[in-house]
Image: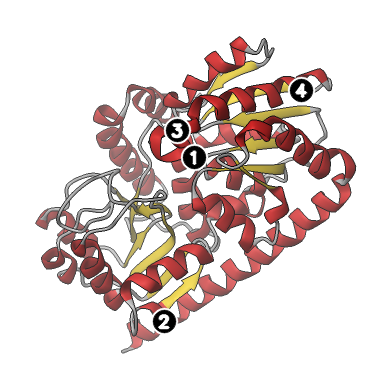
Amino acid sequence: MELIPKIKRFAYYRGREIYHPIRNRLYRLKERKIGISPRYTHVTYDVAGNVGDTVLSQCVRKTFELDSPKGWNIQTVSQPVTQEVVERINSTEKLIIGGGGLFLPDTNPNSKSGWQWAISPQLLQQIQVPIVVYSVGFNNFRGQKNNIAFVENLKLLLQKAEFVGLRNYGSIQAIQNLVGEPFGSKIQYQPCTTTLIRKLYQLPRKQQTGNIALNMAFDREELRFGANKRTILEQVAKATKALEQKGYRLYYLLHCEVDGKFVEYLQREGVRCQVVNAAFWLPHKLISFYQRMDVVLGMRGHSQMIPFGLNCALISFGTHDKMKWFLEDIQATDWYVELTADVDHLAQRIVAKFEQVYERNPMETWDRLLSQQERLWQITKKNLAQIEIDSSSRRKS
């Protein structure tokens, strides 16, 4: 292995304190090696610890590099936004913000913007390059509220942005309700780039393996599960046991380390499965893992969208509206299981959904998945063409 990948892997596993400065230096070394300087700035959430966001961050850049390398000034969304940061943004050609559920008040709580990128209106006004909001989601949990700072900052962002693409129509509707017109009419649909992985990367043909992956999410447990938390988790474990008894090989996958809290429920139910902690993986390793899965039962957004992009059959566990919003967009709400409803019969409902999606109608599931994947790809290509047209017009004016 070359030295740079070794250093990058070491830094990544050590966490954000060492990863960010080394990562940015490696990008600059790579750019000098291939003779390019940073052309685009990417505001993104790519820190070690949430593998879904790690893969997403890379996929966004991959999408904008379909025609040629760009060179990147990467700004982590949770880092402070200073005058120096704005000057570095203005030294590049374009600012890409996203993707991911950045419109969320409590991941990086602040009074400057009210969402994850804590940029004040004063500094936002000073950005002089074209702004592209790309594949971003409105990620409020059920019952969460936004403050006035968020709405006002968002209006300014929408006013300044060249392109605003949100990753599902549920997010589009929610944001339009918050900002009203004329701001809301500027928003377009841009699918999450993780749903397009097979279009972005050269990957081997998917083979049937009999492997099933399960992911449960444990951030904001009270908002996710409510008063029925114990019953819900016990029922999901019972359903997992039933799938094991059908003869499938089971993997419990942690997208974040906190997801390991479900392991005790699997153990109590006597489920034999391999526990896989992917929280600190690099993108290629997670892609390789999902390539070997036939079916994924996922509770996190990216344990839904990444497998979709890799041709896995899906069963989406809902405790957050974004899970159903994605399925609505791909016309697949019949792949959805709401975890907080009819909790006493949840195990039976999960098994029945698995049988419907994978055992009784596998070819129908496969055909629907591929046709929707192609549709999202065509939408993405159209949006990229529009962004390039807008950029060309701006350069000429």
- Residue at which label 3 appears: 227
- Residue at which label 2 appears: 185
Residue 249 point in image, percent of width and height: 75, 21
| Label placed on residue 242 | 4
Say if 18 sits above or below 72 in the image: above
Residue 177 point in image, percent of width and height: 38, 72
Q: CA distance from mark 2 to mark 4?
A: 48 Å
Residue 289 visible to an observer of this rendering: no
Q: Which amino acid, by three-letter code, is at mark 4?
A: Ala
For marks 3 and 2 on the same chain, the one whose residue lies earlier in the sequence = 2
Q: Residue at x 35, y 59 (%)?
A: 97
Q: CA distance from mark 3 to mark 1?
A: 28 Å
Q: For residue 36, which quarter of the picture?
A: bottom left
Q: CA distance from mark 1 to mark 2?
A: 30 Å
Say if 139 sits above or below 157 in the image: above
Q: CA distance from mark 1 to mark 4?
A: 27 Å
Residue 342 point in image, percent of width and height: 63, 39
Q: How would you rate the neighbour count of disc 4 (Cα within 10 Å): few for under 14, some for 14-19, many for 20 or more? A: some
